[in-house]
């Protein structure tokens, strides 16, 4: 029942938006801002990922699953901090760009760095959507839609199971003090 409800919510919001050229072209070799070589890309076997992640994290992040709406740890979280990839620890999103979208999943209007994520065409469910994956380890994070708030108009609709919140000062505040 939850999956049917989730599909009913997601499908009307889905767009035929193609991945943006600058992120789609990045491909699997995309590096984090602090990365300096191809070796910074994380590659593990399914067995290694299973040993590191909970069954739900593995299903969502490594098998491109979706958690039911309004059930994830961060869908309604208000704590300040940086949301990192649960698989490799890559900084992905700041609490400063998180907003309440009403979808039941954590939503953000932009990543901490455009190179933190990659966008990939997702042709499942009989439509074309834009999947968002971690640029370091290719973990499935969720999808991005063109119905978000200003200043970007983007809604990065993510799965809590793919994220880890490191509480503290968001990246924007840390940069202001430098």
Image: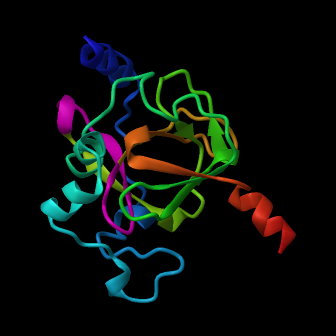
- Relative image position of residue 111 (x, y in whole percent): 56, 55
Magenta region, residue range: 124-140
Q: Is residue 12 left or right of residue 46?
A: right
Q: Is residue 124 visible?
A: yes
- State the residue lying farthest toward the right: 177
Q: What x and y, as percent, mark residue 175?
A: 77, 68
- Determine whether 136 is above or below 123 in the image: below
In which quadrant will I find the N terminus? top left
- Whether residue 91 is situated above or below residue 148 in the rendered picture: below
Position in image of residue 38 (x %, y %): 33, 85
Q: Quadrant of residue 36?
A: bottom left
At x 38%, y 18%, the residue is: 9
Residue 138 sits inside the magenta stretch: yes
Q: 169 above or below 142?
A: below
The residue positioned 38% from the left and 41% from the top of the image is 161
Q: Is residue 80 magenta?
A: no
Q: Quadrant of the C terminus?
A: bottom right
Q: Is residue 37 left or right of residue 154?
A: left
């Amino acid at each position: 029942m939850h999956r049917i409800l989730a599909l009913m919510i997601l499908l009307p919001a889905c767009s035929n938006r193609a991945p943006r050229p600058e992120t789609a072209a990045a491909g699997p070799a995309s590096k984090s801002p602090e990365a300096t070589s191809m070796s910074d890309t994380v590659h593990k076997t399914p067995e290694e990922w299973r040993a590191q992640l909970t069954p739900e994290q593995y299903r969502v992040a490594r098998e491109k699953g979706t958690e039911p709406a309004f059930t994830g740890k961060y869908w309604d979280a208000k704590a300040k901090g940086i949301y990192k990839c649960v698989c490799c620890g890559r900084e992905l999103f700041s609490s400063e760009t998180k907003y309440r979208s009403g979808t039941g999943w954590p939503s953000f209007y932009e990543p901490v760095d455009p190179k933190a994520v990659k966008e990939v065409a997702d042709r499942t469910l009989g439509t074309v959507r834009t999947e968002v994956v971690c640029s370091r380890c290719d973990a499935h994070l969720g999808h991005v839609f063109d119905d978000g708030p200003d200043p970007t108009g983007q809604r990065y609709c993510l799965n809590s199971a793919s994220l880890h919140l490191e509480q503290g000062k968001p990246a924007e505040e840390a940069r202001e003090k430098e």
